[in-house]
Amino acid sequence: MENASLPTDVGSNLTTTLSEDANLQLYLAHIRDLALKVIYITMGTVGVLDNLFVVVTFALFVKITDKV
């Protein structure tokens, strides 16, 4: 017994291709995610280098004050 409310060819309904607009939106979303990753990595690298500069400056300050 077949249910009349369901389409008989369910596979063709599930495997429809995306439109060009949807493909473009997915592509732009991928580019946005990649750009955010690059920005976050750059900001993290600058933060780490800044912290290393502070530690080196503090160490040199301590070394200079020991001599004085």
Image (cartoon, grey):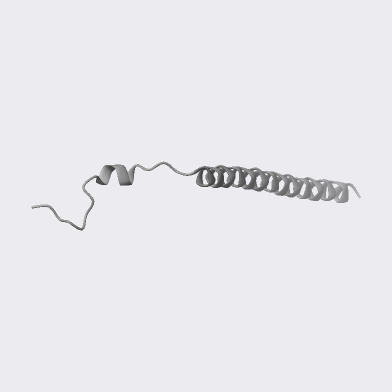
Nearest the viewer among 30 and 38 is 30
Residue at horizontal 73 percent and vertical 44 percent from the top = 49
Residue at horizontal 83 percent and vertical 46 percent from the top = 60
**Which residue is situated farthest in the right direction here?**
68
Nearest the viewer among 46 and 17 is 17
Tell whether 64 sits left or right of 16: right
Which picture quadrant has residue 11? top left
Nearest the viewer among 34 and 24 is 24
Tell whether 33 sits left or right of 17: right
**Which residue is situated farthest in the front direction here?**
4
Q: Position of residue 1 (x, y in %)?
A: 8, 52
All told, the count of numbered labels is 0
**Which residue is situated farthest in the bottom direction here?**
5
Q: Position of residue 6 (x, y in %)?
A: 21, 54
Residue at horizontal 81 percent and vertical 48 percent from the top = 57
Q: Taking 67 as reference, is 5 above or below it?
A: below
Q: Position of residue 32 (x, y in %)?
A: 61, 47
Residue at horizontal 30 percent and vertical 42 percent from the top = 12
